[in-house]
């Protein structure tokens, strides 16, 4: 055997899982075959009373299934019958193990996830090491998958349907203590006592019968025939439908697997699960999510596209100019990983206020038990609030996060460069101003780069890095080194107004406005966006961002036009915002105070009443001059398609124009940064799965009906003609 | 094709469907069904051996109502052992469907005399007792956007723009009409009191009616399906199917929805020759019947499409119908039906309906046939149309015509 070592100690067969040359143990054909052989050998040996299954990896029991194997399976046509037969072998092996007649104990010495837990669930006793990092759970659902080695059958039978749904549907990972409380494991013991405890179960004559193989067995909380089970199914289906909009086949498959399997004997129940597992491989959702949100994201997290020939630098000290919301977030995540931070604002009070905000964020985390006083103190000690540019001396990198105004940005660029060393990188955090233009203020445009952070910085994993025309590879490498240091993922894009993510996202907002102008019911505009999988619908976003912000952009454009001697004509969407503000004094969900300082009532496209909000009832009459009257109403599916298509088309244009150079970046970027629906796997994957030729044809049809913005770029037409796909 | 005639129609009074105080809660569904079945040969003075089949509708055909209550009730009624029986389930229109099936057998020439009707003891076999896959099996709940019926009723009202005042006013009128109908004895011809095993009357009138109901008194009732809809995700599921709806207006409650009651019905149908042979006088003929499927999440919009289809198949129009009966499952169902058919409340549910008197699920369809026939005779009118909304998105209609 090469993966699972077999030895006998004190009448117990000790099976030690340790796949050489791999950082982790994963469930695969070879390891399972060896497990099966090990069990058979132990059963045949009269001197052996029972089996202890453990792992030779430090801190890891078995980390799950082999995702590469699953992704590979999913990339081509699937022979369902063959896959059913192969997976059935796995289930049969685990079934043989739990009915082998001798007690099998899982000595869970560390992380026990997915397939790892499924193997452990087929053991008669689970003893976990007392270490909080030893996470236990079935995380498959998070990747659009589901447990496929008996997990959806054994866990409900072990801890009840309701409790198991709470774990399987969410992919929640438990600490050993939590797992003990939930009944997933029987014991939690210190590391040094693990093997001894496992052996003791065997030598003291522990049962070799699973609860569900006992004649008197009943599913905890009620089995398939119970009214409780029916209520649980009905309620869970409704809540799942509500939350997923029917876009997540894995959630439905898990529910079906439990619903259909619970009343069957274990030998039959596994096959039900396998069938549903295979449906997930037959559908593009799971493999698309797996590719983008696991493999491609991992590349973005590891810096796969960082210039390889530039040596790594350790970022020790950074400067942040602008102690507003973004500056605070960047300061917090940087100081958290041990980087010294100079937090600079135009006066000391503003800088101090920024640091205080970081402190209060941390205080809340402390109250929730997410940090310790010592960690919080150390973090804050690394943030130096100042109004003096001289303090930026010695920074490896400076992030400018001031207001989106070219003039101010130019001023701070010059002021910072005056004290920075020649190798220091100057990064500007902007959501859309072209970097090459901003770099004109810099004496060292090769050191100048764009770094588009997303709010809230503490939670958003993604950074969009923008190359200016003159940005050097060394600067890019250093920017990567900073981003990796603060444990974020990045995509690298080329300069263009709005870059990549904002451009794609902008088309979504535009489409919402367009629908409003066409006379589509506001409820339909909003609900269809949610059906499309967007986390927040467009009119809600406008209210949240603030209508004033958008109004200001339009007013600036008006000023620019008039200064250049050109005539200014606002777009209808700009007209809508201007009307809401100027005639109705509606500024959105968080309106600024009036000129005399009195607060305004929140209200924009929506009316706000404490926790609830409703579309402003007068919206359509107030905007009658802009909105088409008595317009025919499209179906939800038509609106949904428009939202997805307009974003996918913009993404394709960005690729065609060289704004992005890698479709994996393109897919990951908009999902992680601006909430493009994750179940699609990203815009490029969406187009591939839709079928490029069909996408082009449908986009042309939309263009004929709704305008040029739906006209597919040449790149897509060419791909359709040549029968090519992005992946 | 052979004509099918209605020779008689009977029903029990409707008892509150509650074990603690429902007058029929101590009568088994078998006893209720026996009561109406045995009345027919007695009233018609013929030998039960002439009956070719007994078809009973039942929506929760489990427990005491399980295992083919059609045959069991025929035996309990003392029918000749040659009389077979079976049970059908088309949810709320089961009783009407039983009549339609009976008529179809007769029209096809496969039977001479058939009883169609239904039974439901909602106090003894509660709603939902039969379980079923719709709400709990993801394979059907997800694609059809399952929501409980009350949420569908509120969705229907929201889509149609009906207010709480609209549905409450309708409910109050139903109570007023039911009271008047009882006061004037308009149901007397069809009512068979339920007697217990020692011959003492258990119930001789519909006991669910609340004639004192006003729009003001109904205004005090909390909506019944708001919590279900808002806290358990069902409103969201319905809105995903109807994204033009911003929020569901929950306006239905116990006072403007059908009452939960116990009861049974039986309609005696036969061809002309059998009627002559048994010495029975035909009262009306079954013109046509039609059941249809409609969108299941909205669920309750089936009556108008089924009625339109039935009218078209009979070569009739709405103007040819003298009185209309739409089961008052929920007030919004009736409001939609009347507006879709272009008819007024004046000619619809003229003696009140299930909001006032209750809806004993499987029995109701058969009851409504008798109610309409009695009223056509009382008014000396010709045609009536009976329709019900049906769970899972269906509608059933039957048109009858006096002869």
Image (cartoon, coloured by chain):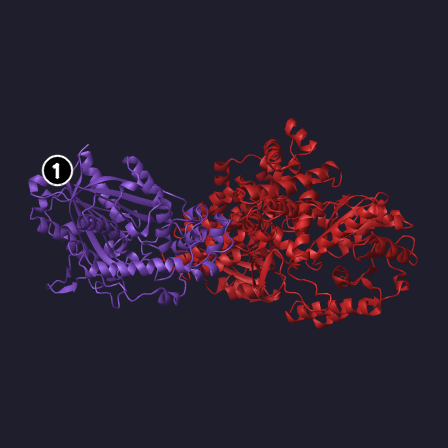
**Which quadrant is the C terminus of chain A positioned in?**
top right
Seen from the viewer's position, the closer of residues B22 and A486 is B22
Give percent across and percent down for residue A241. 49, 52
Q: Nearer the viewer, residue A197 or A291?
A: A291
Label 1: few (<14), some (14–19) or many (≥20) C-alpha neighbours in 10 Å: some
Tell me the subunit letter for badge 1.
B
Image position, residue A35 (x, y; %): 54, 49
Callout count: 1
Between residues B97 and A203, which one lies in front from this camera angle? Answer: B97
Q: Eyeballing the image, is B208 above or below B289?
A: below
The purple chain is B
Which residue of the protein is positioned furthest toward the top in this rendering? A721
Left or right side of A126 for A262: left
Say left or right for A102 vs B116. right
Q: Nearer the viewer, residue A695 or A621?
A: A621
Q: Is residue A251 above or below residue B253?
A: above
Q: Residue at x 51, y 64 (%)?
A: A182
Relative image position of residue B245 (x, y in whole percent): 50, 51
Q: Quick check: can you spot residue B226? A: yes
Chain A, colour shown? red
Provide the secondary structure element on which disc 1 rests.
helix
- Circle 1 residue: B272
In the rendering, at what x and y percent does residue B3 appear?
A: 18, 36
Please say if B98 is above or below B130: above
């Amino acid at each position: 055997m090469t993966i699972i070592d077999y030895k006998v100690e004190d009448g117990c067969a000790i099976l030690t899982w340790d796949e050489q040359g791999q950082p982790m143990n994963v469930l695969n054909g070879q390891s399972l075959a060896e497990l099966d052989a090990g069990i058979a050998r132990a059963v045949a040996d009269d001197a052996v009373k029972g089996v202890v299954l453990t792992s030779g990896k430090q801190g890891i029991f078995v980390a799950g299934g082999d995702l590469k194997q699953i992704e590979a399976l999913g990339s081509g046509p699937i022979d369902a019958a063959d896959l059913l037969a192969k997976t059935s072998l796995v289930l049969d092996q685990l079934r043989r193990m739990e009915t082998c007649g001798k007690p099998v104990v899982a000595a869970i010495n560390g992380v026990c996830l997915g397939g790892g837990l499924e193997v452990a669930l087929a053991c008669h006793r689970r003893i976990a090491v007392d270490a909080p990092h030893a996470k236990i759970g079935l995380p498959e659902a998070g990747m659009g998958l589901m447990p496929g080695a008996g997990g959806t059958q054994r866990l409900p039978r072990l801890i009840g349907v309701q409790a198991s749904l709470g774990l399987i549907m969410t992919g929640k990972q438990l600490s050993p203590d939590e797992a003990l409380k939930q009944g997933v494991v029987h014991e939690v013991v210190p590391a040094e006592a693990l093997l001894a405890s496992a052996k003791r179960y065997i030598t003291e004559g522990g049962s070799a019968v699973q609860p569900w193989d006992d004649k008197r067995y009943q599913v905890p909380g009620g089995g398939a025939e119970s009214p409780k089970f029916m209520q649980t199914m009905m309620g869970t289906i409704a809540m799942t439908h509500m939350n997923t909009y029917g876009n997540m086949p894995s959630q439905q498959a898990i529910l079906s697997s439990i619903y259909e399997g619970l009343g069957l004997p274990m030998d039959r129940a596994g096959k039900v699960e396998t069938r549903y597992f295979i449906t997930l491989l037959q559908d593009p959702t799971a493999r698309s999510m797996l590719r983008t949100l696991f493999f491609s994201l991992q590349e973005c997290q590891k810096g796969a596209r960082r210039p390889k020939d530039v040596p790594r630098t350790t970022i020790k000290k950074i400067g942040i100019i602008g102690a507003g919301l973004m500056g605070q977030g960047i300061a917090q995540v940087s100081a958290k990983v041990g980087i010294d931070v100079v937090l600079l604002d135009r006066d000391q009070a503003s800088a101090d206020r920024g640091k205080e905000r970081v402190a209060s964020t941390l205080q809340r985390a402390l109250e929730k038990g997410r940090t310790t006083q010592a960690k919080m103190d150390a973090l804050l000690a690394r943030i130096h609030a100042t109004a003096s540019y001289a303090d930026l001396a010695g920074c490896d990198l400076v992030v400018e996060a001031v207001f989106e105004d070219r003039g101010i940005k130019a001023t701070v660029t010059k002021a910072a460069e005056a004290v920075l060393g020649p190798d220091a990188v100057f990064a500007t955090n902007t959501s859309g101003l072209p970097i090459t233009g901003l770099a004109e203020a810099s004496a060292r445009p090769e050191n100048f780069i764009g770094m588009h952070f997303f709010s809230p910085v503490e939670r958003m994993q993604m950074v969009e890095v923008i190359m200016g025309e003159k940005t050097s590879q060394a600067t890019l490498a250093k920017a990567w080194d900073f981003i990796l240091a603060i444990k974020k993922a990045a995509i690298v894009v080329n300069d263009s107004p709005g870059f990549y993510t904002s451009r794609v996202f902008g088309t979504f907002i535009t489409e919402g406005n367009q629908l409003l102008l066409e006379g589509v019911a506001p409820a339909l505009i909003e609900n269809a966006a949610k059906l499309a999988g967007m986390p927040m619908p467009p009119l809600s976003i406008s209210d949240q961002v603030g209508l004033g912000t958008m109004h200001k952009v339009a007013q600036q454009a008006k000023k620019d036009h008039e200064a250049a001697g050109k005539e200014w004509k606002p777009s209808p969407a700009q007209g809508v915002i201007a009307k809401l503000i100027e005639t109705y004094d509606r500024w959105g969900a968080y309106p600024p105070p009036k000129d005399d300082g009195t607060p305004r009532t929140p209200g924009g496209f929506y009316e706000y009443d404490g926790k609830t909000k409703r579309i402003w009832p007068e919206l359509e009459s107030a905007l009658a001059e802009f909105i088409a009257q008595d317009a025919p109403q499209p179906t939800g599916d038509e609106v949904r398609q428009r939202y997805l298509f307009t974003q996918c088309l913009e993404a394709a244009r960005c690729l065609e124009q060289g704004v992005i150079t890698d479709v994996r970046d393109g897919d990951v970027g908009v999902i992680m940064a601006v909430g493009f629906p994750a179940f699609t796997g990203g815009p490029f994957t969406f187009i591939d799965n839709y079928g490029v030729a069909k996408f082009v044809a449908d986009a042309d049809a939309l263009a004929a009906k709704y305008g040029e913005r739906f006209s597919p770029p040449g790149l897509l037409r060419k791909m359709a003609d040549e029968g090519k796909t992005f992946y | 094709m052979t004509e099918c005639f209605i020779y008689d129609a009977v029903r029990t009074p409707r008892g509150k469907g509650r074990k603690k105080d429902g007058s029929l809660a101590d009568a088994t569904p078998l006893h209720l069904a026996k009561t109406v079945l045995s009345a027919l040969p007695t009233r018609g003075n013929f030998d039960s051996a002439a009956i070719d089949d007994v078809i009973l509708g039942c929506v929760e055909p489990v427990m005491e109502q399980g295992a083919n209550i059609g045959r069991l009730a025929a035996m309990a009624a003392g029918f000749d052992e040659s009389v077979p029986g079976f049970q059908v389930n088309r949810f709320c229109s089961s009783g009407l469907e039983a009549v339609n099936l009976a008529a179809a057998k007769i029209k096809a020439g496969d039977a001479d005399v058939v009883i169609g009707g239904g039974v439901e003891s909602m106090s003894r076999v509660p709603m939902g007792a039969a379980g079923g896959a719709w709400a709990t099996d993801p394979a059907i709940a997800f694609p059809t956007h399952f929501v409980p019926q009350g949420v569908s009723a509120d969705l229907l009202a929201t889509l149609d723009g009906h207010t709480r005042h609209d549905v409450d006013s309708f409910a109050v009128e139903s109570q007023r009409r039911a009271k008047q109908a009882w006061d004037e004895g308009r149901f007397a011809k069809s009512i068979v009191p339920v007697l217990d095993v020692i011959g003492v009357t258990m119930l001789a009138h519909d006991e669910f009616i609340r004639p004192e109901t006003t729009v003001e008194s109904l205004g005090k009732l909390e909506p019944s399906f708001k919590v279900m809809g808002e806290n358990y995700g069902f409103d969201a599921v319905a809105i995903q199917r109807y994204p033009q709806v911003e929020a569901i207006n929950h306006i239905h409650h116990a006072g403007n929805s059908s009452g939960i009651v116990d009861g049974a019905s039986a309609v005696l149908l036969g061809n002309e020759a059998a009627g002559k042979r048994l010495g029975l006088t035909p009262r009306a003929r079954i013109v046509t019947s039609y059941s249809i499927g409609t969108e299941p999440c909205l669920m309750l919009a089936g009556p108008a499409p089924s009625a339109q289809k039935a009218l078209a198949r009979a070569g009739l129009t709405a103007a040819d119908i003298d009185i209309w009966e739409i089961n008052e499952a929920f007030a919004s169902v009736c409001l939609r039906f009347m507006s879709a058919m272009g008819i007024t409340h004046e000619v619809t549910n003229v003696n009140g309906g299930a909001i006032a008197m209750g809806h004993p699920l499987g029995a109701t369809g058969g009851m409504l046939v008798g109610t309409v026939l009695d009223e056509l005779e009382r008014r000396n009118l010709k045609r009536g149309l009976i329709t019900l909304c049906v769970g899972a998105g269906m509608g059933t209609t039957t048109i009858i015509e006096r002869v």
